[in-house]
Amino acid sequence: MNDIDRDKRLDIYTRTMKVNRTDEKFRSILAQGKVAVMYYSVRGEELVSAASMAALNDDDYVVCTYRGQGEQTAKGIPAEKWWAECLGKATGTCKGKGGTMHITHPETGIMVTTGIVGSGIAIANGLATASQNNGDGKVTMVSFGDGAANIGAFHEALNMAQLYKLPVVFVCHNNRYGEHTAFSDHTDGDSIAQRAAGYGMKGVRVDGNDIVEMYGAAKKAVDSARAGEGPTLIEAMCYRMMGHFFGADYSYMPEAHLEEMQAEDPLPKLRKYMLEHDFTEDELDEIVARIDEEIEVAVQNALDAPFPDASELRVDVYEEEMTA
Amino acid sequence: MSEITMTEALNHAIDEAMAADENVFCLGEDIGDKQGGGVFKVTSGLSTKYGDQRVRATPISEVAIVGAAVGAALAGQRPIAEIMLMNFVGVCMDQIVNHAAKLRFMSGGQTKVPLVIRTTTGAGLGFGGQHSDMLEAWFAHVAGLKVVTASNAADAKGLLRSSIECNDPVVFIENTLSYGLLSEDPGKDHRVPLGKAAVAKEGEDISVITYGRTVNDALAVAADIEKKGVSVEVIDLRTIAPYDEEAVIRSVRKTRRAITLHEAVKPFGTGAEISANIHQKLFNELKAPVGRVGGVFSPVPFASPLEQAWLPTAEKISSAIMETMEWRS
């Protein structure tokens, strides 16, 4: 793909900034001690998520991980419900019973957020199997990290997806770290994408911080899946610019890696691209201001919302409510 | 009326469910007719009738099988996943325990996982330590799962159909040695409600609380022991979890004595939970502590005499009943 049309640029920029501003706000309220919950920052991976989600239809399915804020926000979960869930409130998407690692919102296609590395890859196949069975034309996209590429579920699921030509797209955020272990310390192969060939699958490695490359690869994979041409494995190169989770030490990252990471920060690159492609500083600032305003209200409402009642422990375990 | 085997009963339940609801589909290793219709022939003929897409023969990939079943269930389908032998659940426990069981709760009820995991097992065939275990207690211990097993062909048909129609994930345990058991054909669209135990035999003096293949062992022992003047009631739980507490308490309130019986190893087994509950609810009415019978706490052995020594045999069941009958404080 050579370039993206103006509307799509604006769309991806808006989604990217929603992800970024949500991340900034979350780290800020955690740092201030306003809340104490697990949060896995997506700083550095905003564009990968935003461009991937922008390639999907609104009713397509998504499976993501505990580091899934990017997918969740970019796919369009309403901020109010998202923040309330992250703060464990009754008004959240999951009534406060899922939390940051299990955000679910079928209305926007976020079907599963898993806290188990790699497991979502196998579940994505099932959503795609359903679409293949009932012909609803939906595509399923699943995101995971480079660490997940070394767990058995990845291998089993990719082989099965290709065998059945399922309408699924595998997006590996290669953020160079699996928890605290550098990519080169957990994988000897050159890339994740090249493994696709072993399954007879299409595989591509892209610069996840380049809007044209990232969106182009995602769009092509989604179109191909929807056309019945089977799955694609996308390896999106990016950086996890924070520790594994909020507050986690990341002094194990070498100085050279930190410098490389700063130089590749997707946000200044994206802003530069937008300014060179028909947008003004004022227009972009206004978008961010609007997003910040929405987040402010959502966070305040979430802080003020009630926690779920203890009776919720008996509800949603099974279809029938459990007796006390 | 004609008779059917348990294999036929299970096959008919799946066939009727697939005919009635296009969202029902099967996936598992070797289950298509091209692969012989399943290692125990339960799915025989179904891929020919419904096509390879609704009867998906899979690679040997238990994680991918259950993962795909979970995902399809989230999207509104009713998958029946076959895990060929129960010990293989060790490969895919994450999908069952962390996902199938919990997604309804963790999503606050926005999603549900109406899937059935059919699997078979049982000692007595010389399959050794990795192909014989009854592991129902693993699943009974997980909130969100239902665990079902049948002692006869008619119930197998009705329970499987109800499991397929259940909106929660069901682990449906078959017994390899029971596939040939005959029942009168219960007819089309037979259903047995989940969570309801059956009184397999009425009795007055002692209740044997059991399920699956050992129901038949208990019935044989009961017939024999009645010659000694002991009237035994046999309760077939049918749904192991969540079990029919009311039926158990009703029976033991009447007999005032009970033993639990299962093939799975005794320590930390389902019998311990049931026994504890009986003691709490009926402490003052019991004439003896509740006895427990189960497999020996070792891996299932290979050599035939060892395997027989491992099993909860008629002799062990009989002794446990007599000990409970003769108990004096």
Image (spheres, coloured by chain):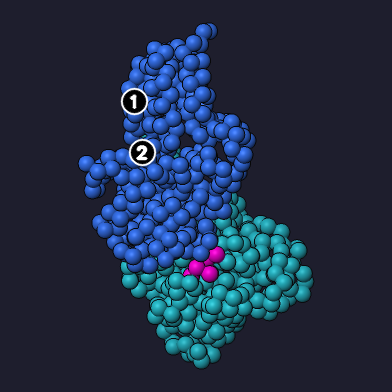
In the rendered image, the residue lying farthest to the left is B1
Could you say where residue A280 lies in the image, as x and y percent from the top left?
A: 50, 86
The residue that mark 1 highlights is: B201
In the rendered image, the residue lying farthest to the right is A255
In the rendered image, the residue lying farthest to the top is B329
Q: Amino acid at mark 2?
A: Asn
Q: Could you tell whether A82 is left or right of A234 in the image? A: left
Indicate the quadrant where residue A61 lies.
bottom left
Chain letter of disc 1 in the image: B
The residue that mark 2 highlights is: B152
The answer to whether any part of residue A184 appears in the image is yes
Q: Residue at x 40, y 78 (%)?
A: A228
Magenta stretch: dominant secondary structure: helix
Q: Could you tell whether B260 is left or right of A136 in the image? A: right
Q: Secondary structure at mark 2?
A: loop
Q: Amino acid at mark 1?
A: Lys
Q: Residue at x 41, y 45 (%)?
A: B179
**What color was chain A assigned in the picture?**
cyan
Residues B107 and B169: in front is: B169
Residues B290 and A108: in front is: B290
Question: What is the letter of the blue chain?
Answer: B
Q: Residue at x 59, y 37 (%)?
A: B304
Q: Secondary structure at mark 1?
A: strand
Indicate the quadrant where residue B77 lies.
bottom left
In three-dimensional space, the C-alpha distance between marks 2 and 1, rounded to whole angstroms, equals 14 Å
Could you say where residue A301 lies in the image, as x and y percent from the top left?
A: 44, 55
Q: Residue at x 59, y 71 (%)?
A: A173
In the rendered image, the residue lying farthest to the bottom is A2
Q: For the magenta stretch, what is the residue range?
A: A156-161
